[in-house]
């Protein structure tokens, strides 16, 4: 994709809305339109039309040095400049930017033979930033710089929010600069055989232990359970429980942080990190109903609630000193406005991300803007600077063109070695969902959906009838919904995110494993269309490679039409993609030459994989569901349907990349069997060196003596951890299982069971001991015999 095309597609946004129009609309009182600070000389005066500021296409094009051609046979104006082309149909609410249809949220209109177009739409398609200045009654247009534009003023903030209402979501992903894949829950020593450095305080006393399964080695991800080789740290409802875990026969609870008992702001811990010095607790806190200044009888000195509000949620980080684990000392607190999205820990740097909803409606309804300004700006708090929240000025808040939503994404970064220094905070107008980060880069990927134009076809009217209701009837054909992913790249420098580049690819992402960074290239797997469609709008899958400037370098499009991506894994110079409809095709893709990716081979088998994990350079483990295909007697619809069955784990041999094979498989239970691993990769414990594979699972089973249809669910049979031995000679060998349920619990079970506090959530390894963790218990079992070595009730 050429640079001009990428930029123009990115910046083509919507229009100035009626909520920001001047009160007077006479010709001599229309707002001044300035380009780079200088008034544009219009031959035809701009006009307010249906609440939108419009101007002549020819005048706008002339101001930018562009050419305009009118096509009478097609009833459209064509604006061109170098490689840029904008087609504007007559009386249309959409246009074509370099051949791509874009909704205008306005309508081109003809005035005395001249076409008028929304000023904002035109200018942002041409890579310009448009701002409204209510104080000067002017529209200010400037060339888009290499950095992101700032919100600047409250007027401009509301302009952006009222005119950029769209369907979409921002997903935040982080990658490692030089990527090396890790085995799940890598052990110390690490799973590739090299010894990972243990903290100084543990080198002489801690055995090898498992760590959280992360996507990229060197970039830690938070979880509900962590260990440092001697102790277990667990998120336990609204508490953090610190347990001496090693040796297993001396297990005991050392301390409990009970946030329910705190008298201050309510706090809900969700995830934690642990290093050799600190326990980092991340969660959501609740602010009291906000009181903000307003113009009362004594001026801006009184406070009141701006409107009835629910309690506001903040993202809070609490850092504890681990010197004395029986009496943890709080050494730092930090908060970001908004709900917790995700976080990453890279060395001593902690990054965490929040999403704050912007309620701008009170601003539109009140004449006294000062009354609600405090509620519109984002804020943060750091105990290193005091207890008060700091408001971020809007001239320091950036926005993402074509990704504007009534939300702020706030990124906080702190150095855990310098807790006395305030954290760095950057704010962006948008929203966030998922995270993927590195020592060098952070990526925000925005999935943008646009409803395509509706084609209208005339229906002949029977001249013999005078029924007026048949006049002007049109056939309507809905075009496929257009989806694209916009990627914003930020560099991570000194615990701060700084904007670097922008890129765009067609389609939507599945999750964080749909993205990857390797040897200076960024790789993505996306899906366009819908599985239920049978026309050109059917689902298709794609692989893209982007260069250092996030421009498309290579691609493979239209893989497995009619199916969608269920899982993707990028490993070195290859990508593995699982799509599914009725069968599970595993595609092997060669990315060694980023400019020319190649589809090498495919394997079609029953079932699908929700998560792919590397075993070694020639083998891959898939975790998903088995399926059963049933024929349908429906000549006008699908001929068959696939029902998912029990959980399926498979070992794929990709030694011959052109002919991948399913070397081994294991089916667990029947329909209804589930595991958190299928939704959360952190639930996996794997060590190739120990031939160890373990994960929590809830097993449902059918009565083998009674025939059941393919859509029949099983009855509850087990909840706990399955432990497998896995090697290349015998495949998956179930060694046993560990449960926290008692025999009495199992007797009381019907079709389902409420495991409650006895539901095993994680499996960890310390030395020769396996630990299973639930909210109610920690059990220690011998690695070799699986015999119980100890059990601890969590009070």
Image (spheres, helix red, strand yellow):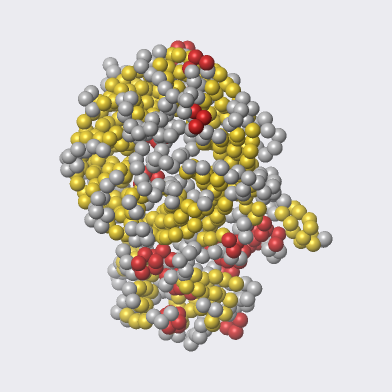
Front in this rendered view, residue 715 or 675: 675
Image location (x, y in percent) of residue 305: 72, 52
Q: Quadrant of the C terminus?
A: top right
The structure residue drawn at horizontal position 64% and vertical position 36%, both measured from the top left corner, is 330
Image location (x, y in percent) of residue 257: 62, 29
Front in this rendered view, residue 376 or 712: 376
User: Left or right: where does residue 196 sit relative to residue 226?
Assistant: left
Q: Quadrant of the N terminus?
A: bottom left
Residue 478 visible from this viewpoint: no
Task: Reply above or below: 693 against 358.
Answer: above
Task: Reply above or below: 50 against 330.
Answer: below
Front in this rendered view, residue 188 or 115: 188
How many numbered marks, from 0 up? 0
Residue 53 visible from this viewpoint: yes
User: Left or right: where does residue 289 sit relative to residue 315?
Assistant: right
The structure residue drawn at horizontal position 21% and vertical position 25%, both measured from the top left corner, is 729
């Amino acid at each position: 994709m050429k640079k001009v095309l990428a930029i123009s597609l990115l910046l083509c946004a919507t229009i100035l809305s009626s909520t920001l129009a001047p009160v007077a609309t006479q010709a001599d009182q229309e707002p001044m339109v300035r380009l780079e600070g200088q008034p544009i000389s219009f031959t035809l005066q701009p006009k307010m039309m249906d609440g939108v500021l419009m101007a002549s296409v020819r005048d706008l094009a002339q101001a930018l040095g562009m050419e305009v051609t009118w096509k009478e046979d097609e009833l459209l104006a064509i604006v061109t400049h170098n490689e840029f082309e904008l087609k504007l149909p007559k009386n249309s609410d959409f246009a074509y930017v370099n051949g791509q249809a874009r909704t205008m949220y306005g309508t081109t209109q003809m005035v005395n033979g001249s076409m008028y177009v929304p000023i904002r739409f035109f200018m942002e398609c041409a890579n310009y930033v448009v701002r409204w200045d209510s104080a000067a009654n002017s529209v200010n247009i400037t060339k888009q710089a290499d950095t992101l534009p700032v919100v600047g003023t409250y007027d401009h903030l509301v302009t952006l929010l009222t005119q950029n209402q769209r369907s979409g979501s921002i997903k935040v992903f982080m990658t490692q600069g030089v990527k090396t894949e890790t085995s799940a829950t890598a052990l110390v020593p690490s799973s590739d055989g090299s010894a990972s450095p243990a903290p100084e305080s543990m080198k002489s006393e801690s055995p090898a232990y498992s760590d959280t399964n992360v996507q990229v080695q060197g970039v830690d991800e938070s979880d509900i359970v962590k260990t440092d080789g001697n102790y277990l740290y667990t998120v336990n409802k609204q508490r953090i429980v610190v347990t001496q875990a090693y040796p297993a026969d001396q297990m005991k609870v050392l301390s409990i942080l009970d946030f329910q008992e705190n008298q201050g702001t309510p706090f809900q811990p969700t995830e934690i990190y642990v290093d050799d010095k600190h326990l980092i607790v991340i969660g959501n806190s609740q602010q009291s109903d906000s009181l903000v200044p307003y113009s009362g009888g004594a001026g801006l000195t009184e406070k009141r609630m701006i409107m009835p509000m629910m309690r506001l949620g903040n993202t809070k980080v609490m850092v504890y000193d681990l010197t004395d684990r029986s009496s943890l000392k709080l050494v730092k607190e930090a908060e970001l406005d908004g709900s917790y999205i995700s976080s990453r820990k890279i060395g001593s740097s902690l990054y965490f991300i929040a999403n704050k909803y912007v309620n701008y409606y009170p601003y539109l309804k009140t004449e006294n803007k000062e009354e609600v300004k405090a509620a519109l700006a984002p804020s943060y708090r750091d105990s290193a600077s005091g207890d008060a929240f700091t408001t971020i000025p809007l001239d320091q808040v950036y926005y993402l063109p074509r990704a504007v939503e009534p939300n702020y994404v706030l990124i906080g970064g702190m150095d855990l070695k310098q807790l006395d220094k305030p954290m760095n905070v950057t704010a962006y107008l948008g929203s966030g969902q998922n995270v993927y980060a590195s020592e060098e880069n952070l990526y925000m990927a925005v999935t943008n959906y646009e409803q395509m134009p509706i084609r209208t076809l005339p229906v002949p009217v029977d001249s013999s009838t005078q029924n007026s209701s048949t006049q002007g009837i049109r056939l309507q054909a809905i075009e496929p919904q257009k989806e694209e992913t916009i990627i914003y790249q930020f560099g991570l420098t000194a615990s701060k995110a700084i904007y670097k580049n922008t890129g765009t690819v067609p389609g939507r992402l599945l999750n964080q494993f749909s993205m990857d960074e390797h040897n200076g290239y960024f790789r993505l797997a996306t899906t366009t269309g819908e599985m239920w469609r049978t026309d050109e709008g059917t689902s298709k899958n794609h692989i893209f490679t982007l260069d250092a400037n996030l421009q498309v370098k290579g691609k493979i499009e239209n893989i497995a039409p009619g199916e969608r991506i269920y899982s993707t894994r990028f490993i070195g110079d290859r990508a593995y993609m699982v799509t599914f409809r009725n069968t599970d095709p595993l595609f092997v893709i060669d990315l060694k030459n980023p400019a020319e990716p190649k589809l090498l081979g495919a394997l079609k088998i029953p079932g699908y994989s929700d998560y792919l994990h590397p075993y070694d350079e020639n083998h891959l483990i898939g975790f998903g569901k088995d399926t059963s295909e049933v024929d349908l007697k429906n000549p006008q619809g699908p001929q068959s349907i696939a029902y998912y069955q029990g959980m399926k784990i498979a070992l794929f041999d990709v030694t011959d990349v052109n002919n991948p094979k399913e070397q081994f498989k294991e089916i667990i239970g029947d329909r209804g069997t589930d595991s958190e691993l299928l939704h959360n990769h952190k639930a996996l414990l794997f060590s190739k060196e120990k031939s160890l594979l373990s994960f929590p699972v809830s097993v449902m089973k059918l009565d083998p003596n009674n025939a059941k249809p393919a859509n029949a669910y099983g009855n509850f049979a087990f909840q706990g951890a399955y432990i497998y031995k896995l090697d290349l000679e015998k495949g998956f060998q179930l060694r046993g299982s560990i449960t926290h349920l008692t025999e009495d619990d199992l007797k009381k079970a019907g079709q389902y069971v409420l495991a409650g506090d006895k539901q095993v959530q994680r499996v960890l390894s310390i030395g020769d001991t396996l630990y299973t963790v639930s909210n109610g218990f920690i059990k220690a079992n011998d690695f070799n015999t699986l015999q119980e070595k100890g059990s601890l009730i969590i009070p």
